[in-house]
Amino acid sequence: MKVAKLWISLGLVIAISFAVLGYYGGEIYHSMPPIPKQVVSTDGTVLMTEQDILDGQNVWQSMGGQEIGSVWGHGAYVAPDWSADWLHRESEMLLHRWAQTETGNSYDRLNDDQQALLLSRLKKEMRTNTYDSGSGQITLSPDRAQTFTELSRYYAGLFGHDPQFDKLRDDYAIPSNALKDPARAKALNAFFFWAAWSCAAERPGENVSYTNNWPHEPLVGNTLTGSMVIWSVVSFVLLLAGIGALAWYYATQKHTEGEERFPEKDPLLALSPTPSMKATLKYFWVVTALVVVQAALGAITAHYQVEGSSFYGIPIADWIPYSVTRTWHTQLGIFWIATAWLATGLFVAPAVSGHEPNLQRAGVNFLFVCLLIIVVGSMVGQWFAIQQRLGFTANFWFGHQGYEYVDLGRFWQIFLTVGLFLWLFLMARAIWPALKKGSETRNLLVLFLLASTAIPLFYVPGLMWGQHTHLAIAEYWRWWVVHLWVEGFFEVFATVVMAFLFTRMGLLRVRVATGSVLFSTIIFLFGGIIGTFHHLYFSGTPIGVLAFGAAFSALEVVPLCLIGFEAYENLTLTRARPWVKAYKWPIYFFVAVAFWNLVGAGLFGFFINPPVALYYMQGLNTTPVHGHTALFGVYGTLGIGLMLFCLRGLTTNFEWKTGALRFSFWAINIGLLLMVLLSLLPIGLMQTWASVEHGYWYARSAEFMTRGIIHNFVWLRVIGDSIFTLGLLALGWFILGLKTGWSLKGERVPYLSDKPKAKAVSSRK
């Protein structure tokens, strides 16, 4: 296919996809559950106000939000989903109240006919939408109003310091006195009530709740809907059709089997790193440090599932409770992966253009200082927030926003956004001279610049919600960042960078690289942009979101069916010429990316993506199965591979001692696989059974999660975690050795001739 047609196709895919994404973003405003001005009982007693609910959302965010349990299925996994937990407890309390009042017995002691009558009454009570759009009020029956009061006392004790909840707090990994102010506890209860009310109250004129009948709760009639089944079947059919179409397309293309003409010598020997390229070295040191710290925080976070207030007997919860360690663990993952990719861009830009702009090194150094301030400052702010030492406004700006992967305060978000645009400026000024030349690489350079532009541009949606923005709207914009920024355009950027590296090394022709990258980007974004909706099935969104999300998330998997070819081709490159052996382990990490793309993003991703699956699985341990194997397996491994390529370019004159690197590669990948297969996946499957059989609340309950068999599988995770951590430490040891010398042999690779005198990159004075 001609390059011009590919560009047109890419433009159409992006334009149409974002039109759909934007349209349904507007529709969410009409379908999301209303926040009432007041919730009152039939006798006129005001139970809560709109401000109470909004303040309660801020309280929840300041505690860690989605890092301490979840709401509507999004968040952490040790504590319950608070919307499902409140809904079930409220339902049981109503049933017991009615049974005791009308028969003098508990609900459990009633016969089947009596229970059936009360269950029918409960469904009518919970599913009837009493919101009056004229007055802005929700009206509750006296029984439900009394239940709200009693349940409020329960949660106030749980998040306070009531000693009767000590065991349960430990099971949930919540420290005693997590909320020190009774007013905050009252507001939190208002928010939890509203989130649970949204799960059962039916949308006007429909027979499904605002959350599309999520969570599965048989007591109130929350069960699978016909639309979930239909669109799940459609997603299966589209997946098979897409795989067939792509396989057919691949088979019709001409694949030359002849011998490729690869360079006899390493072209990168002609590379003379410029001052700005050398300045990226410290970025990679920080990347190495952050990944080790992230792994340590991950170990502590996982251990909290068996010891909710300590780490092997050390009482650390008062200082770094679960919500802090998990916040830092997830945030550092984004930080170090993004830093590795940003540093790669700063290294590659002058290399591909042969141009070093004035003050480029100063800009690289300034950006480095800014990134350090953002990382440290945001982490300190989050700690103060979770310790309840910040007011609502201060928390929003400098503390903890409570949204997974975008937890940092708004000030730090703005600071990071400015830093990303500064990075784009540094990239653009470095490659601009090459763009003006109109060489064979022009199309690849344009795509490189567009992918670079998308990185700061698609972090901006993280600024689209405010302190009191409706949860459904905040979730919509959050997934623009998590899915489109992290999983989308960063991958496009990395694909282009890899193409540049291979063309620069003479292992891939520019024309082939350009066509392949454009085609891959079209296929990936065709499913990926609209596929964002699969995160939003149950977040107060209309049925169209479920339909498009199911269909296009299936199409996201289609390109991964041919991932074996990519892995094989990358592996073959290591045997192209003797000098390519110097790049063996960076290329092996790219092979690992292909493997985890298929397994983590493909198999484990589609395992939970269809609506019929996610209805039962959302927020269970099946989610971190996909999260770990996709985020680290794909994007983390890719970041390590890119980092190693850049470090190879900075140490071209020396041969590496690769023993530690070899161990690191295999330990990281084997450890990650064991972490999933021995622990996360079995727990997730057992939770799924519990969710289907008894209801979602039970799969997340302390009763289920503290069973001996669950704890056994948690302990089995130590095997994979230990191997994985040793691999990361070996990687850090190797990279440190590039500075100290113990990772270098101190001699040129023997099969390379003297370094050519012509320099590929010039530094303008």
Image (cartoon, rainbow, N blue to C red):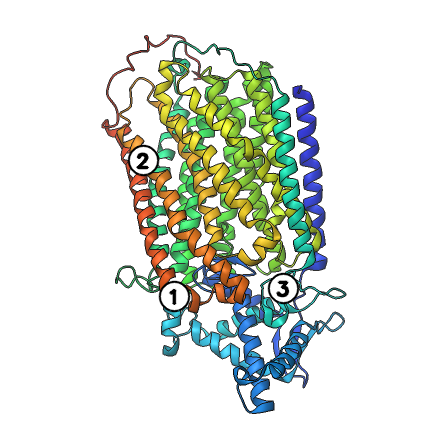
- Amino acid beneath label 2: Ser
Counting every numbered tag in the picture gives 3
Determine which residue is flagged by label 3.
223
Q: Residue 229, image x and y in percent?
A: 66, 54
Determine which residue is flagged by label 2.
664
Q: Residue 368, image x and y in percent?
A: 41, 36
What residue do we see at 56% from left, 68% from top? 191
Residue 549, visible in the rendered structure: no
Task: Tell me the number on the disc at residue 706.
Answer: 1
What residue do we see at 31% from left, 51% from top? 718
How far apart, in angstroms, are the residues tagged by discs 2 and 1? Answer: 34 Å
What residue do we see at 55% from left, 34% from top? 561
Q: Secondary structure at mark 2?
A: helix
- Residue 556: name its quadrant: top right
Please state if 338 lies on the left or on the right of 492 as rendered: left
What residue do we see at 44% from left, 51% from top? 681
| Of the two numbered discs 3 and 2 in the rendering, the one whose residue sits closer to the viewer | 3
How far apart, in angstroms, are the residues tagged by discs 3 and 1? Answer: 26 Å
